[in-house]
Amino acid sequence: MRSGIEKLMKEFISAKAESFKFSAFDVFVREELPEEFRNTGLIDEHTYMVEGNTGTENGAMVPRVCVFHRSLTAGQRKGTCVAYLLSQDGQRLYLCFLQDYEDIRTTHSLERTVQILHERAEDIRSHIQGRGFVPSCGFDLGEGLSEQDVCSREGTVFYTCYEISALPEEDVLRNDLQRMMEVYQAYADWQLQQSRLGTFDSWEVLDAKTAVKHCDKSFFDHNGSGVPQNIQWFFGADSVEAGKTKSLELIFHGERYPSTIRKEPRHGGRARIFWTANLGNKLQAYRHQKDATATFIRLDHETFEMRMIEDDTTMTGQEIVRQIRTFISAKGFSYPDKLVENLYLSLKSKPFVILAGTSGTGKTRLVRLFSEAIGADKENGRYLQIAVRPDWSDSTDLFGHLDLNGRFVPGCLMDFLAKARDDLAHPYVLCLDEMNLARVEYYLSDFLSVIETRDRKEGHIISDPLVQLDQYGADETARERYGEILFPENFYVVGTVNMDETTFPFSKKVLDRANTIEFNDVDLIPDFVQYGQGVPVSVGNAFLKSDYLILKDCKEEDHEYVQQLCTILQSINRILYKSNSHVGFRVRDEICFYMLNNHRGGFLEEKEALDYEIMQKILPRLQGSNLSLKETLCELFRKILAKDYDRQDGDAAGMKELLENGTGIDYPRSAEKVMFMVRRFEEDGFTSYWL
């Protein structure tokens, strides 16, 4: 392989002085060099084809050797490929992963073609790992290039460069080709996967793990269903020979049922999946339901969870949350009791939650597992985790900006928001990891403002735009791709934070808009209980969608309950006035929303729920060194949190003694936090909610 590459580079200049056509160099590039690459053992000829070209017959001036995936291409210059491109002076050889440009160029100007290639390259890079190659097209093929050569260079997604003066050894060249072929195969898998999604007869494939069957009469009559050839890959039947069967296992309502899929010897290769009569009898309950559908969730190659569409609507909120807890436990993680219920109620009340705690307590993992448990994961594109960078000073990293050429460069959140907007039936969860490494008020300023403009219209929650049309400038492609983006009603944001010397504190603007959940208590004793296989719950967005945006949204039968709750909040606020820490209508409303959701769903005891809200909406606002702050904390403890505490002055030791006694405490979590804050004030002359 090295000798062939070296010959290509050394003989190109002298061969270029004469006609390439029918020359020995032409034969070498077209036949001998491709054969050398085939003989490396790195290129499967059943999957790929290798072609060499000196460039003379297609207007190109740069010799190349290309590897094409047979499923993605029709021949030379037609299809995304792996290519070796030689510079015009023969001094540099570039191993590239480059895009097909032929169809684009036939309908667009060269300038527009280059722009489209750049946009598509960014999209590919967002889906495919570069495995150490340069993610750019900024390399030098020489001067006076043909349009074809310009398109090849500008369509490059990843590359590496070899200098003739320092050509690597054989093992390095082979390793590079192997890695670039891995990039190509990943791209091919992605493209083929995209083509596998969609509607096929009575089936709809939503993603690699989810397929939906629209149930007809035979579904219930024959304990099975036909499977079109287009989606047999989903059940692993594409490799089953005609007339043969493959064993499967279906899980329905937690019970396992042996099943099979059989490839029909006729009928165009159609297959049929069969399940047992026991499962068939249970499915009869859905026979007369209008537009009944069955969702198949692939857990592994032979195991599938089966859910009827009505399952999630008939499950109560408590049952769904219980299933979420089971899913998380089955993954090997344990969290404090009632934390999942609290997280759910917080998201249901407002789609912005902050998880605070000691580093390593599993905050980010909790967000991910919670999302996966409700069917929102990375694979189906409904979960996104973004690591916040310390240099973020505005919203451009999230939402995008115009470059010096007037082209819109999308931020890392744009595609996720657009996908959520176009799929309002499902929840989309964003995790901002270590969100306070930069100032949240700066890079989330647009988000913090727009979330307060949410309103209800024709059954949907709308808002002012997060991204307006004029932000795309003159870039019509971006304007057409993204359009105006509001705050999607199925978009939920959870930020994880550590409070230490490397991070920024939160302003009241942020704290007022979020439920701040803190968990620092860590039980280091492992739990080896076997919970079985965790099964996600396929919930719709209604499970998390806010039922309340203003207090007037509450039902008439809830008015008395809200009045009683606000009476307690008013008592708390009178105490907070003394240190100028009182809350406004926003905090009042959001506490009421949380309590109403709990009141209807029965997730927590009433005082337990209000205890969480005092911890999450009121206490995080309290910090400072004024004596009035300590007096406020002591009065809160004495009059609200622990009414059996009769000491008028208040001190941490007395509070601790009462807490250890464990009686007469209405809100134990908040009382313990206040005790901690008072003790810190006594020791340091300053206190805050944060450790």
Image (cartoon, helix red, strand yellow):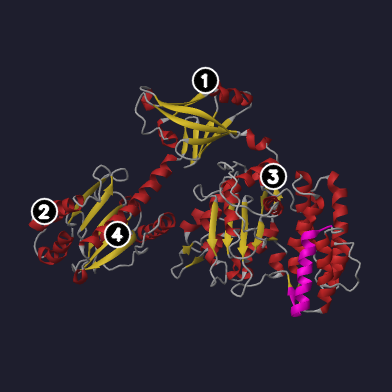
**How far apart, in angstroms, are the residues tagged by discs 4 and 3?**
50 Å
Amino acid marked by disc 3: Gly
| Residue ID for mark 4 | 96
Residue 240 appears in view? yes
Q: Is residue 682 magenta?
A: yes
Estimate how packed mark 3 is, as few (under 14), some (14 to 19) or many (20 or more) residues with alpha carbons within 10 Å: few
Residue 485 appears in view? no
Eyeballing the image, is 567 above or below 650?
Answer: above
Q: Are marks 3 and 2 in contact (CB under 8 Å)?
A: no
User: What percent of the width, then of the height, locates residue 348?
Assistant: 69, 51
Eyeballing the image, is 208 above or below 257?
Answer: below
Amino acid marked by disc 4: Cys
| Residue ID for mark 2 | 27
Q: Are marks 2 and 4 in contact (CB under 8 Å)?
A: no
Image quadrant where residue 523 sits: bottom right
Image quadrant where residue 221 sits: top right
User: What percent of the width, then of the height, locates residue 157?
Assistant: 35, 59
Instruction: Please tell me whether mark 3 sits on a helix, a strand or a loop.
Output: loop
Amino acid marked by disc 1: His
**How far apart, in angstroms, are the residues tagged by discs 2 and 1?**
62 Å
Q: Which mark is residue 459?
A: 3
Report the magenta residues as a range.
Answer: 666-687
Q: Earlier in the sequence, mark 4 or mark 1?
A: 4
Say which of marks 3 and 2 sits in front: 2
Amino acid marked by disc 2: Val
